[in-house]
Amino acid sequence: MRTSTRKRLLAFPALAVIVLLSLAGSAYAHHGFVSWFDMGRSVTVKGTVTSFDWTNPHSYIYFDVKDEKGATQKWSAELGAVAMLARAGWRKDMLKPGDEITLIGNPSKDSKPMMHLDKIVFANGQELATAL
Amino acid sequence: MTVAATLALSRAALAQEAAKPGAAPDISGVWLVEKFEPRLFPNGGGAPFTPWAEAKFKATDPKTNDPNLACLPMGVPRFMIAVPYPMEILQLPARVMIIHEGPQVMRQVYMNRQHPKDLDPTYSGDAIGKWEGDTLVVDTIGFNDKTWLDGGGLPHSEALHVVERIRRVDHDTLVDDITVEDPMAYTKPLTNRQVYKLKPGWEIQEYVCEENNKYTYQGK
């Protein structure tokens, strides 16, 4: 379980993204996640699903995030391998274009609209972690 | 032979072998590392590099030249320590096989022979094993130098020699005490202990790393 110590707004352009400083790292890092993503921080991003790659070595959620002015930014969230996700309760058909989601994970180190996903919150409030 | 066919054959052979009195200790099952830490020295420093290895280490970059970015095999001991996916151990009378889910590689430990002479270097090397009481002692040589020892980029040469002492300390726990010797790369042996937990009901699943690999490997 993550321990949040403080909150602040991240400087992604025109996006309201909450950053939670985290004391814990991801349970499952692979393919050099630690090189690409800041595993010491956590961001929470709300958006609309555009597609879902249920693939190896990683799965991906692609989603649109809108700012207050209506501008859209294309985001992606990287998940783990299919088999481990399935063991954690994920299914390939659980996301479809248009779904409203909230994603919590580690931001990219170079401020690109990418994240390493730790947990998803569906529109109905159901939560699902990527790790067991 | 496909992995699926090998699994089916091996389970049948294992069942026959398990019924024999005096059979080898049972370390079979699907296991997952208890704590995923891909680096041998997670706190930095510590590796007793030779000048040759230190220069190689300084040239490593997990974002560009990690062989894993190209879905290449992990090699040993990285295969045993830096994989956040389960492995299945199958025991045959003359072989112990370790099948990893991802990247999908089968490591074979031969129980009834010595290392062949003039080994052609490979990613997994040549592994031979013997039982010392409840401990499976695995001796592996014959590696190529294309892999990293761990997820942190520790290099090695073809002189790499890995000795593992694998034992089931209780029904749900497997321990692998790993000793790495490579006089070309390190001035003294490296040691590491990995702890795995049994995962009842789990089956090794397909994992095709090349399916949607978005990372780019810029190594040789």
Image (cartoon, coloured by chain):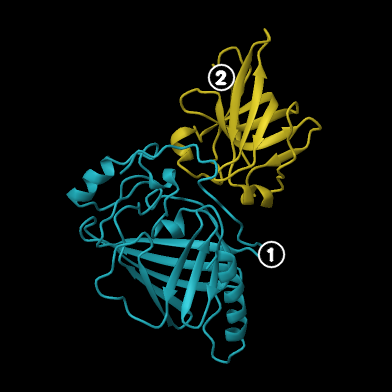
Chain colours: A yellow, B cyan
The crowd level at tag 2 (other Cα within 10 Å; few <14, some 14-19, many 20+) is some
- Residues at marks 2 and 1, common chain? no
Left or right relative to B50: residue A129: right
Q: Where does residue B165 sit, x and y in percent of width and height?
A: 42, 72
Marker disc for residue A10: 2
Q: Is residue B144 visible?
A: yes
Compare residues A132 and B121 and report the one nearer the observer: B121
Q: Is residue B177 above or below residue B185?
A: below
Q: Which quadrant holds residue B161?
A: bottom left
Q: Residue at x 35, y 41 (%)?
A: B65
Q: Is residue A19 visible?
A: no
Q: Amino acid at mark 1?
A: Gly
Q: Residue at x 56, y 59 (%)?
A: B86
Q: What distance separates the C-alpha of mark 2 from that of mark 1?
A: 43 Å
* Label 1 chain ID: B
Marker disc for residue A78: none
Q: Residue at x 69, y 35 (%)?
A: A120
Q: Is residue B163 above or below residue B22?
A: above
Residue sitting farthest toward the front: B1
Label 2 secondary element: loop
Q: Which quadrant holds residue B31?
A: bottom right
Task: Determine which residue is flagged by label 1.
Answer: B201
Q: Where does residue A10 sit, x and y in percent of width and height?
A: 56, 19
Left or right relative to B160: residue B138: right
Compare residues B51 and A62 and report the one nearer the observer: A62
